[in-house]
Image (tube, rainbow, N blue to C red):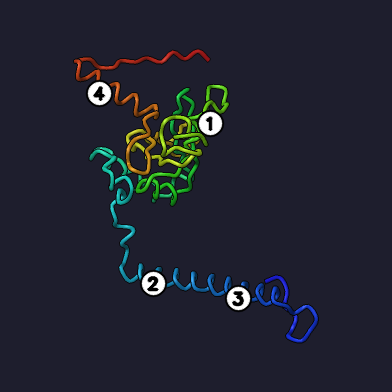
Amino acid sequence: VNSAPSKPGNQGWDKDEKFQTSNRMFVIFHIDSMMKKNEHTTIASEKKGTAMDTTPVFSGFIDEFGLWTEEQREAARDIAALVDSGKLKTFRVSVPDAQSKLRSKTLLPDAFKSALRDGVEFTSAFFSFDSAEGVAYNPFGKSGGIGLDEMHGFSNAILVPDPLTFRVLPWAPTVGWVLCDIHLRSGKPVPFDARHQLKSSISRLKTLGFELVTGLEVEF
């Protein structure tokens, strides 16, 4: 509230001022109600004991759509324990784009633990970029310009960490890093995701009796 309104009978007291005062009272009441609701929620949580601490780390979006193998789930438990130890201060979640550049977010510990349950909101904009970071497709055209209604208008998708790729960065020993897959809200992988395309290709190779062997040439 910025200033007290004029009293009835004083100059300046009009319907607009009454409305503004009423609005302010409503906002204060709404905030107070939200605080009480949060307080009640906290008390209810405390009465239930340490439910949040004992809940499996994979209890949200990732579990709902079965996006992890048992091996990944076990690795996620170990990572969650490392987060709780306080040894790491920040966590980078990354996904490669079509040009193999990493698109990333940096999360604090609590947010990263949440990411191990529900993934991370992440823009799908980079799928419309060319190698010079220019917008190659009109994101506000039909189907987002790339034939997928769910990605219209640079909408968000969900980054899902792959616990098997988790590392502590050697040059930044308080930073954890993990590669992610990117999914639509339906749980389906974004079809243009580089990791999804690679895994699909490797799977097809296996059905033909081949396996992928790769090497890295470091030039710079």
Judged by depth in the image, the label closer to the viewer, 3 or 2, is 3
Give the residue displayed 41% in from the left and 15% down from the top. Answer: 216
Can you say whether 77 is above or below 217 in the image? below
Q: N-terminal of the two: label 4 or label 3?
A: 3
Residue situated in front as seen by the camera: 126 or 135: 135
Task: Give the secondary structure at mark 1.
Answer: loop
Give the residue displayed 57% in from the left and 26% down from the top. Answer: 134
User: Looking at the picture, how far across and down is residue 141, in whole percent?
Assistant: 50, 34
Q: Which residue is mark 4?
A: 203
Q: N-terminal of the two: label 3 or label 2?
A: 3
Q: N-terminal of the two: label 2 or label 1?
A: 2
Distance from Cα at disc 2 to Cα at disc 4: 49 Å
Q: N-terminal of the two: label 4 or label 1?
A: 1
User: Looking at the picture, how far across and down is residue 9, in whole percent?
Assistant: 76, 86
User: Looking at the picture, how far across and down is residue 191, in whole percent?
Assistant: 36, 30
Q: Amino acid at mark 4?
A: Ser
Q: Which residue is mark 3?
A: 25
Task: Give the secondary structure at mark 4.
Answer: helix
